[in-house]
Amino acid sequence: ADLHTPASPSAEYVSKQAIFHDTLKERNIQLMLNLGDVVSWVDTDKTRSDKKEWAKFEELWKDSRSKIAHFITPGNHCIHNDHTGESDFDEYLRVSEMPGQTREKMDFTFDFANVRFVSLNCSQFAFAGNQYIWSDPMSATRLKEMQDWLDKLFASAVGKVDHIVVFQHV
C-alpha cells in the first residue's frame, strides 16, 4: 500500500509506523520492497514536492533502513505532481539511493539471495488526469527502451540467479 507519509503525521500514524517497524525487527526481515508513493504531494500550494514529507519519511524509516535492505521503486507521488504536471526527481533520488538510478533512468536492478529484483519506473509515462497515456509517442519510446533493457537484463541473469522478480508502482 502507498505510505503517503504526511509532513505532520498524526499520533495514530506515528504509532502505526512504530508497530510496523517493531514487527520488522521481531521477524528478522532482511529485505523490504517499497512499491512507491512514500510521500503524497500534499504541500499547501500543490506546486512541488514537499521536502517536509521526505524528511518525515526519512525520520520514521531511519532505524529500519539502517538494518534492513530497503529498496524504493518510484511512484507517481514520489516524482510527479498530479496538480501541475511537474516532475521533481531530486528528492526521490536523494532519499532512495537506488543502484544505477539517474534522472534519465530510474529503473534499477539488484541481486539478493539468488534472486534478481527488477524495479520498473512507470511514473515517467505520459500522464493525463488519473491515467497513463500508453499511445503517446513518448510512452511508446519509453516502452521500447524498457523492453530492450529487460531483454539484456534477463539474458545476463541466465545461470546467475534462480528467480527474477519484477516490481513497479501502479
Image: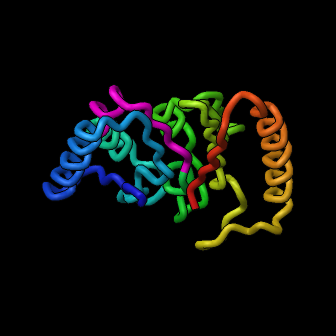
Q: Position of residue 9 (x, y in %)?
A: 22, 53
Q: Nearer the viewer, residue 101 or 82?
A: 101
Colour pattern of the rendering: rainbow
Q: Is residue 62 magenta?
A: yes
- Asked if residue 17 is positioned above or below residue 139 in the image, the reply reads above
Image quarter of the C terminus:
bottom right
Residue visible at 51% across and 29% down? 97
Q: Position of residue 138 (x, y in %)?
A: 82, 56
Q: Position of residue 95 (x, y in %)?
A: 45, 34
Q: Nearer the viewer, residue 151 or 73?
A: 151
Quadrant of residue 151 in the image? top right
Residue visible at 46% across and 54% down? 37
Region of the chain picked out in magenta, as a range: 61-74
Q: Is residue 41 magenta?
A: no
Image quarter of the N terminus:
bottom left
From the viewer's perspective, tell me whether residue 25 is left or right of residue 51. left
From the viewer's perspective, tell me whether residue 44 is left or right of residue 131. left
Residue visible at 41% across and 51% down? 39
- Asked if residue 142 is positioned above or below residue 1 in the image, the reply reads above
Q: Position of residue 154 (x, y in %)?
A: 78, 39
Q: Nearer the viewer, residue 4 or 32?
A: 32
- Asked if residue 169 is positioned above or below residue 62 in the image, the reply reads below
Residue visible at 80% across and 40% down? 149
From the viewer's perspective, tell me whether residue 32 is left or right of residue 24. right
- Asked if residue 123 is positioned above or below residue 112 in the image, the reply reads below
Quadrant of residue 159 in the image? top right
Q: How many marks?
A: 0
